Amino acid sequence: MATATLSIDLDAIARNWRALDALSAPGVETAAVVKADGYGLGAARVAGRLARAGARRFFVATAEEGAALRQALGEAAQIMVFSGHMPGDTDMIGDLGLVPMLNSLEQITRHLEALPGHPFGIQLDTGMNRLGMEAAEWETVAPIVLSARPVLLISHLACADEPGHAANAAQLAEFRRMTDGAGVPRSLAATGGVLLGEDYHFDLTRPGVGLYGGLPFAAAEPVVRLSLPVIQVREVAAGETVGYGCGWTAPAPRRIATLAAGYADGLIRAMSNAARLWAGATPCPLVGRVSMDLVTADVTGLDAAPQTLDILCPEQTVDALADAAGTIGYEILTALGPRYARRYAEGRG
Ligand SMILES: *Cc1c(COP(=O)(O)O)cnc(C)c1O
């Protein structure tokens, strides 16, 4: 079968969630961010496992993602939507009990008019300039908005993966200035913010990438293994080339394996001549350009022709593969394509 297998260790995700939860004080709630289909790994399966581990609140990017998650999780879970309340979202938010994080006066007005009494949170901009209300705007409307009783005030750190960055303390101070005394639960920390320490934790943390084994949570357990079937193995002579654009030239006689996954599956072209595939602990360089459905690897160093090689495994984590391709682990995870056979491992713990 020329379909690669993406193995997802749901128990490792649960252990990563518990490990992040243990970094904040017992009174601080740890939510889970499962946007972009659980960072590419399957939001329903991930959130279901985390609900069993004790997570009660889940964040998604859009109301549509929230609707899909509601189907999977049932009524008890709290589902929060980062993009807030957009035109056309009202029925989904209302009928499915989603909690929008309102980002602007326009969204606040829309929400309070369309769904009076329906829970909402507020996202504040403390310096990232991406989503949320700016300080001046917030100060004007805060008394009115607070009287409608938001369930959560959040903001997001721009540089939390760089502990020494001055923006962290500046955003923390601004968040305090904008929310102290509001009497509403607060949340500032994603994965990076959890690692910055208790000052950043407030009432609720909302890690994403660390759950899935990615940096900046360096202590995370790896979660994914991606195994590619070998379709064909051939011998090439010194001076022969491999792949589109004759992108690699054999320096000596070499054995080349052709494997079933390519850039249509999220193995981005920047991995060409840069990443490695793995036979257990033995690395095999990816040689030549990544094609749409195929990659080629130099397996000369192996004793026997392999049946499969791994491109994500404990030897090459999402961040190591990202480094080879000049990107970040987040992008490697969320690029994982729909063609893989996804296998979930889940015990009872
Ligand atoms: C994606 C996101 C998170 C989770 O971030 P990680 O770095 O993956 O932990 C938390 N909060 C907001 C607002 C986000 O957009």
Image (tube, rainbow, N blue to C red):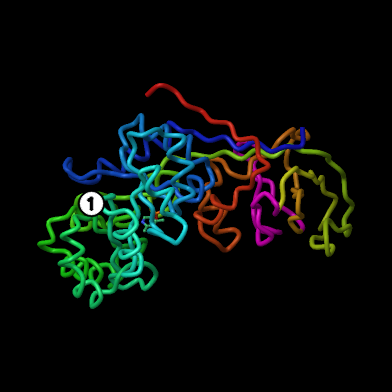
Residue occupied by mark 1: 151
Mark 1, secondary structure of its residue: loop
Residue drawn at point x = 28 percent, y = 44 percent: 30
Choose between 188 and 295: the one closer to the eye: 188
Q: Residue at point 76% right, 53% down?
A: 292
Please report the bounds of the magenta region as a residue range. Answer: 263-288
Q: Quadrant of residue 271?
A: bottom right
Residue 65 coordinates in the image, percent (x, y) = 48, 48
Q: Compared with residue 33, is residue 10 higher up or lower down, i.e. above or below?
A: above
Q: In which quadrant of this rendering is ligand 1 seen?
A: bottom left
Residue positioned 54% across, 56% down in the render: 331
Q: Quadrant of the N terminus?
A: top right
| Depth order, front residue of 241/97 | 97
Q: Residue at x 34, y 57 (%)?
A: 114
Q: Nearer the viewer, residue 218 or 25?
A: 25
Q: Is residue 148 magenta?
A: no
Q: Left or right of 304: which side holds 282? A: left
Front position in the image: 211 or 309: 211
Rendered view: 92 above or below 53: below
Res 19 → quadrant: top left
Q: Residues within 10 Å of mark 1 (few under 14, many from 20)?
A: some
- Counting from the top left corner in percent of width and height, residue 328 is at 51, 59
